[in-house]
Structures are given as structure tokens and as C-alpha cells.
């Protein structure tokens, strides 16, 4: 596979790629850099936020959600990049010392948000995760918050089966991807190990393709793993970055795989870049927030 860096921007901790099919735009964040980024064609727009931001997701109402340390906010996309207009939607996790991490919307446009102990210093430097204080929360269009899980370490990967009865959810602290059954009332069953520790790094964010295969970014592994529905490794996709963080399918035919990455002690030239790779199997659509 051949790859390209889609922009000259390099993130300290790139994450949360989201492809907005109606707008043909790529959204992502630099968590440590406190930036929300949107690329439409060759036009890159960067909003500088007051806090670390873990996700940037457009809304049906025309603005976008940003998940900050202090809560989930609406961002007015017409506001100036240096003076973003933010409106609080909700505080999903009131636990002191926690921050937002993984966030995605399900087929109904509800935001699922995983939180964790804050692991970022004042300059964006890494701090050790010493407690499992994180949780998983669902946020409806009317801002109602439903707690779904507690005691999480570093939540990463949020994907659903086509029939919406199964949730794929990872905890990087465990090095494991889990599968949860989703009950009719929306609550989760107990976690079941789906893909355990692997020598190529730890699991970070993921994307699902149209065949039901999960593409998982491997932090410190320098690759993606394409995982079959039965949890077996189908393919290893080598990357020119040491810390890929997540991926999403985009482009007009959903055959462009966008991969975010982070800076690393190895200082590879493309660490922190967003990469694009053309693949044969198309992906599944991202969902906007319904509110």
C-alpha cells in the first residue's frame, strides 16, 4: 500500500478522525495541542481550544461537538479559529481528575463517550495512568446522559455491529478489545474478550469496513491490524509512523483510509501526521450527532 500525508500539520497527539460524508470533510483533533481540525478539499481550518479536546464531531443542527476536559460543548463552526464560540451541552463525567477520550456516535446519532484519568501535564506531556477511574457514557440528542460502564483505564475504540446488538470497545490499559451485548433497553452486558494482547503495540482507535472487519491502530506498534469478525488477525498494515492512534474510512467511495498519529520519542518524520491510504474494501459511514 502507498500512503500520503494529507497536510503538513503535525499533531502532538492526533486522534478521533471523523469523515463527514454530507460535507465531504475530515474532522480530527490534537488532544495535547488543544486543537480541533477540519479539512475540506485542500482547505484546513484549525480551532484553538482552551482545554485538551478528544473528539470533534459535526451535528445535525449545523454546529459540532467537541469533548473537552470540563464537558461536552457545541462549537460554532462559523466562529474564528482563534476565538471559538463554545456552548456547554452537558457534563457526562463529573469525576474530578478525569478527561474525555474516545467518542463516537451510534446509528441513532447518540454520542458514546469514554473517559479516563487525565494523563496530560500542563505542557501536554504524558503522565502515568494510576487509577481505573474512567467510564462510558451515552449522550442523547436532548443532552440526557446515561452511564453505561465504570472502572475503565484508557477507553479506545467504539464501534457497533451492523444490527446494533454488539459493541466493540477497547481498553488500552488492558491491551484488549472487548465485545459487549447491547440489551433492548440500551444497557450493556458483561464484557467478553474479543481480541487480547498482541506483540504489535496496544489497541487504540478503530474503524469498521463494509465486510465487518475491524481496522485497529496499534499505539507503539507502527501498524494497523485488520481483524476478522471472529477476532483473528487477517492482515497487518505497516505504517511510516510509530504511534498510529485511530483511523476512519472516507472519500466519495469510502475507500480512503485516514489514519491519525502522535509524536513519539523515535521522532520519525511523519509522527503526528494524518496519513491517507487507498484500500479495496469500503468502510462504513460515520454518524453525526443527532442534536
Image (tube, grey):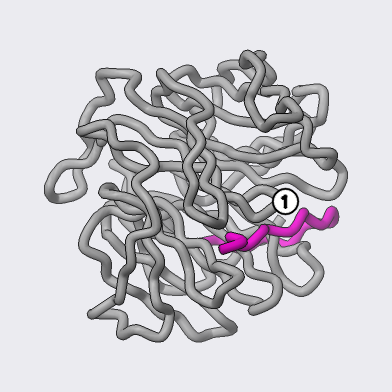
User: What x and y, as percent, mark residue 30?
Assistant: 36, 58
Q: Which residue is mark 1?
A: 107
Left or right placement of residue 231 versus residue 119 in this view: right
For the question of whether residue 269 can be seen, the reply is no
User: What x and y, as percent, mark residue 194?
Assistant: 69, 19
SS under mark 1: loop
For the question of whether residue 242 can be seen, the reply is yes
Left or right placement of residue 191 versus residue 252 in this view: left
Q: Main secondary structure of the magenta part?
A: loop
Residue 277 counted in the magenta span: yes
Q: Tell me the quarter of the image containing the N terminus.
A: bottom right
- What's drawn in magenta, residue-wise? 274-291
Residue toward you, 76 or 89 = 89
**Please, is residue 144 above or below residue 167 in the view?**
below
Q: Residue furthest left?
A: 122
Q: Quadrant of residue 216?
A: top right
Q: Quadrant of residue 213?
A: top right
Residue 26 counted in the magenta span: no
Residue toward you, 181 or 279 = 181
Q: Residue at x 66, y 48 (%)?
A: 106
Residue toward you, 31 or 89 = 89
Q: Residue at x 69, y 76 (%)?
A: 22
Badge 1 crowding class, 10 Å Cα cut-off, few under 14, some 14 to 19, many 20 or more, is some
Left or right placement of residue 152 versus residue 50 in this view: right
Amino acid at each position: 500500500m502507498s500512503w500520503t500525508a494529507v497536510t503538513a500539520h503535525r499533531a502532538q497527539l492526533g486522534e478521533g478522525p471523523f469523515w463527514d460524508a454530507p460535507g465531504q470533510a475530515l474532522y480530527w483533533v490534537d488532544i495535547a495541542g488543544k486543537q480541533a481540525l477540519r479539512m475540506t478539499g485542500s482547505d484546513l481550518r484549525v480551532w484553538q481550544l482552551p482545554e485538551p479536546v478528544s473528539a470533534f464531531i459535526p451535528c445535525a443542527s449545523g454546529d459540532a461537538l467537541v469533548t473537552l476536559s470540563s464537558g461536552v460543548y457545541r462549537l460554532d463552526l462559523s466562529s474564528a479559529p482563534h476565538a471559538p464560540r463554545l456552548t456547554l451541552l452537558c457534563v457526562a463525567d463529573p469525576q474530578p481528575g478525569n478527561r474525555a477520550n474516545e467518542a463516537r456516535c451510534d446509528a441513532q446519532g447518540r454520542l458514546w463517550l469514554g473517559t479516563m484519568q487525565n494523563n496530560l501535564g500542563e505542557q501536554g506531556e504524558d503522565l502515568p495512568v494510576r487509577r481505573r477511574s474512567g467510564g462510558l457514557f451515552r449522550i442523547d440528542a436532548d443532552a440526557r446522559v446515561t452511564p453505561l460502564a465504570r472502572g475503565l483505564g484508557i477507553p479506545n475504540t467504539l464501534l457497533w455491529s451492523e444490527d446494533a446488538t454488539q459493541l466493540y470497545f477497547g481498553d488500552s490499559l488492558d491491551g484488549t478489545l472487548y465485545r459487549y451485548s447491547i440489551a433492548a433497553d440500551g444497557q450493556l452486558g458483561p464484557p467478553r474478550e474479543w481480541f487480547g494482547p498482541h506483540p504489535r503495540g496496544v489497541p487504540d482507535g478503530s474503524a469498521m469496513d463494509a465486510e465487518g472487519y475491524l481496522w485497529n491502530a496499534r499505539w507503539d506498534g507502527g501498524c494497523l491490524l485488520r481483524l476478522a469478525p471472529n477476532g483473528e488477525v487477517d492482515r497487518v498494515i505497516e505504517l511510516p509512523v510509530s504511534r498510529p492512534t485511530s483511523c476512519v474510512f472516507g472519500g466519495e467511495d469510502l475507500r480512503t483510509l485516514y489514519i491519525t498519529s502522535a509524536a513519539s520519542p523515535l521522532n520519525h518524520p511523519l509522527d503526528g501526521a494524518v496519513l491517507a491510504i487507498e484500500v479495496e474494501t469500503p468502510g462504513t459511514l460515520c454518524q453525526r450527532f443527532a442534536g
